[in-house]
Amino acid sequence: MREELQARLELLRKEWETGTARLRELERQQAQLGETMLRISGAIQVLEELVSDGVDGEQPENGSAPKVEAKEEAPVAG
């Protein structure tokens, strides 16, 4: 009987360690997701302000986004 109890105790300790490690991993993932959501929220806020104010003070004529002129870049030496 004592050996069975000892085996069960060892099994429960291993399960506890596994659960604790999993909980730490989930908490790390939760923190990363929270940071990502915060960045997304900030980007949404900036874009909403740009849309409501019009980019560069321009109001789109037909509801589409204003056209942005492409700038030529010098080739990168490599």
Image (cartoon, helix red, strand yellow):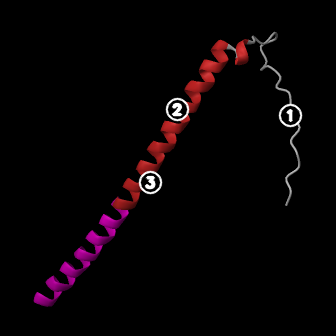
Spatial CA span between label 2 and label 1: 29 Å
Query: Upstream in the sequence, badge 1 or badge 3?
Result: 3
Whether residue 50 is in magenta: the answer is: no
Q: Which residues are magenta?
A: 1-23
Q: Residue at x 31, y 65 (%)?
A: 19
Q: Residue at x 63, y 25 (%)?
A: 47
Q: Residue at x 72, y 17 (%)?
A: 56
The residue closer to the viewer here, 15 or 63, is 63
Image quadrant where residue 43 sits: top right
Residue marked by disc 3: 29
Secondary structure mostly seen in magenta is: helix
Q: Nearer the viewer, mark 3 or mark 2?
A: 2
Asked if residue 11 is positioned above or below residue 35 in the image, the reply reads below
Lateral position of residue 75 relative to residue 8, left or right: right
Residue marked by disc 2: 41
- Check disc 2 and report its element: helix, strand or loop: helix
In the image, farthest residue toward the left? 2
Percent across and percent down for residue 41 are 52, 32
Query: Upstream in the sequence, badge 3 or badge 2?
Result: 3
Residue marked by disc 1: 71
Percent across and percent down for residue 48 are 60, 21
The residue closer to the viewer here, 54 or 13, is 54
> Residue flagged by tag 1: what amino acid is it?
Lys
Q: Nearer the viewer, mark 1 or mark 3?
A: 1
> Residue flagged by tag 2: what amino acid is it?
Ser
- Check disc 3 and report its element: helix, strand or loop: helix
> Alpha-carbon neighbours of circle 1 within 10 Å: few (<14), some, or many (≥20)?
few
Asked if residue 76 is positioned above or below residue 64 in the image, the reply reads below
